[in-house]
Amino acid sequence: MAALVVQKYGGSSVADATKIKHVARRVARERDAGSDLVVVVSAMGDTTDHLLDLAASITDEPDAREMDLLLATGEHISGTLVAMALQAIGVPAISLTGAQAGIRTDTTHGKARIANVDPSRVREEIARGKVVIVAGFQGSTGDEHRTGEVTTLGRGGSDTTAVALAARLQADRCEIYTDVEGIYTTDPRVVPDARLLPVIGYEEMLEMAQQGAQVMQTRAVELGWVNGVVIAVRSTFSDHPGTLIKEVSAMELRDKVRGVALDRKVAKVTLVGVPDRPGIARGIFDPLAAAGISVDMIVQNVGHAGTTDLSFTVPAVELPRTRKIIEPIVKAEGFRDLVTADDVAKISIVGAGIQNAPGYAARMFGALADAGVNIGMISTSDIRITCIIPSADLDRAARALHAAFRLEAPEAVEGGVGRV
Ligand code: ASP
Ligand code: MG
């Protein structure tokens, strides 16, 4: 039986007609090699941003249902054009909307979750010998809800479409094509020594993505992990094999840092003189959670004289909404002050080896100190240590940590044993 390959092409890979024709040739080559293909596409270039701007120029509070129907059109355009480009070079192809491709979601407009995938139409079209193009980033509400309402999966959601289809179709390969060669140890625009990783574990990739590495949507990584889908991240414009995201053996995970993740889009909120009594934290974080604002690092100082200071971080884009929610609480509860800053950034070292070996935190803090970088907040997980630092110091901090953990050095055995 022919191998089934799911390929996903990001917005920059289908940004104009020339690139769409290039993608078509790439798909045709894979088909000539004997594979069946499902091709998931993002919207062309910045189309989704333009559609968002367009809606914002009409109203401050666009209706969520209409917004999803609008945003979904971006992927319809790229899907149809890729199908036409394939047909034009003699490859039978058909494009499907997310709904037609059987992507069923819950009813949360703007960040719907995939409930299931009905693969029947996609399978039928493959059986007819067609390359099936699927509009990424979208689905429709399924059986138990009002059916047939178009939903979108959140920014970057085409990755999730691809991994969900690969899982449901039990694809032999799942390839995410983008404008970089794969996953790097850190952002190569910041650290010229950044090295392409041949392999990264799911958990490590998830932490890297959550902490700012922008190559893949975190939900797609999660979905791949849960379903055991090996994901290749590769460049549309080269034949480099890229990076494989997969389960990495315990042996390979020993004693190492895999990468340094950077996030500039962070804001810090400090509540000064917060009464030191039960219920205060709930009074602050409940309303933020209800507004769907994800609070990241939380640091509360030891109380003195009946009050304490509480700091936390939110995504920078959420700072205005956060202030709007917190200001009335500050007044009502008599906190001394509310201080916010968006000139902070987050830097993390990530590696499954961290959990087995002591000393990583000390080395990280030492490297930052040597580089003259002041640490504002610290948080850790099993496989990650994160510091909040001044934005202006981020690039310098990244270079310092990359060098301190010798991430530029190729490993004898990738994921190698006992280095660091
Ligand atoms: N077009 C959508 C976005 O820009 C989805 C995607 O590209 O994956 O977020
Ligand atoms: Mg994307």
Image (cartoon, helix red, strand yellow):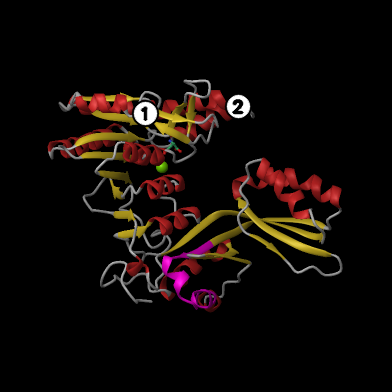
User: In this orientation, which residue lies closer to the viewer: 267 or 217?
Assistant: 217
Do residues under tags 2 and 1 come within 8 Å of each other at their CB atoms? no
User: In this orientation, which residue lies closer to the viewer: 98 or 104?
Assistant: 104
Q: Residue 30: give x, y in percent of width and height.
A: 18, 39
Element class at badge 2: loop
Residue with the mark numbered 2: 62
Indicate which disc residue 7 carries.
none
Reply yes or no: does residue 351 show up in magenta: yes
Element class at badge 1: loop
Indicate which disc residue 118 carries.
1
* Quarter of the view holding residue 219: top left
Reply yes or no: does residue 4 show up in magenta: no
Q: Is residue 130 visible?
A: no
Label whose residue precedes the other's in the sequence (2 or 1): 2
**Region in magenta:** 347-365
* Quarter of the view holding residue 256: bottom left
Task: Residue at 41% x, 40% y: name it.
Answer: 160
Task: Residue at 51% x, 24% y: name it.
Answer: 144
Q: Is residue 376 above or below residue 73?
A: below
